[in-house]
């Protein structure tokens, strides 16, 4: 399963009420590093679907949620567990570095 899109309207239900850890990729169409990291996140989502969900939130289309979480630099990837932020990853990284950052959720 690849990543799904969340919006300001669906964020509370899709992310904050998620049963398992969920990573939100805050991104925008015009962001080159966001586009570079997107297929990597899709691959991680596919390989670890049983342990971690990954969703995408376009900051231009959903400014309310981006503002609420203080997103000032993208890509920003926040892992939520039980409705709380438990991990922040800022900037595009290669797959091994992202997997290392997420190791506690992928184990």
Image: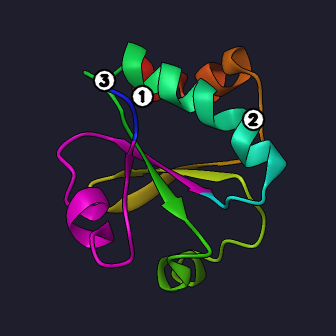
Where is 96 relative to 58, above or below? above
Tell me, for residue 2, which label it has, or none.
none
Where is 81 relative to 101, above or below? below
Mark sitting earlier along the chain (3/1): 3
Q: Is residue 104 magenta?
A: no
| Residue visible at 64% across and 77% down in the picture | 70
| Residue visible at 55% across and 31% down in the picture | 41
Secondary structure of the residue carrying tag 2 is: helix
Where is 47 relative to 87, above or below? above
| Residue visible at 35% across and 31% down in the picture | 52
What residue range appears in magenta?
4-26
Residue for badge 3:
49
Secondary structure of the residue carrying tag 1 is: helix
Mark sitting earlier along the chain (2/3): 2
**Does 62 sit left or right of 82 as displayed?**
right
Quadrant location of the N terminus? top left
- Nearer to me, 6 or 99: 6
Residue for badge 1:
105
Q: Is residue 5 magenta?
A: yes
Where is 7 relative to 107, above or below? below
Where is residue 7 drawn, in percent x and y? 38, 69
Of tags 2 and 3, the one toward the viewer is 2
Tell me, for residue 36, which label it has, or none.
2
Quadrant location of the C terminus? top left
């Amino acid at each position: 399963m690849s990543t799904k899109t969340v919006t300001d309207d669906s964020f509370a239900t899709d992310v904050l009420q998620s049963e398992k850890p969920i990573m939100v990729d805050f991104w925008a169409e015009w962001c080159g590093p966001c586009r570079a990291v997107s297929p990597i996140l899709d691959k991680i989502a596919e390989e670890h679907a049983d342990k971690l969900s990954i969703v995408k939130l376009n900051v231009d289309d959903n400014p309310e949620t981006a503002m609420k979480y203080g997103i000032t630099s993208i890509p920003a990837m926040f892992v939520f567990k039980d409705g709380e932020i438990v991990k922040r990853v800022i900037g595009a990284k290669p797959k091994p570095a992202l997997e290392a950052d997420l190791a506690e959720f992928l184990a």
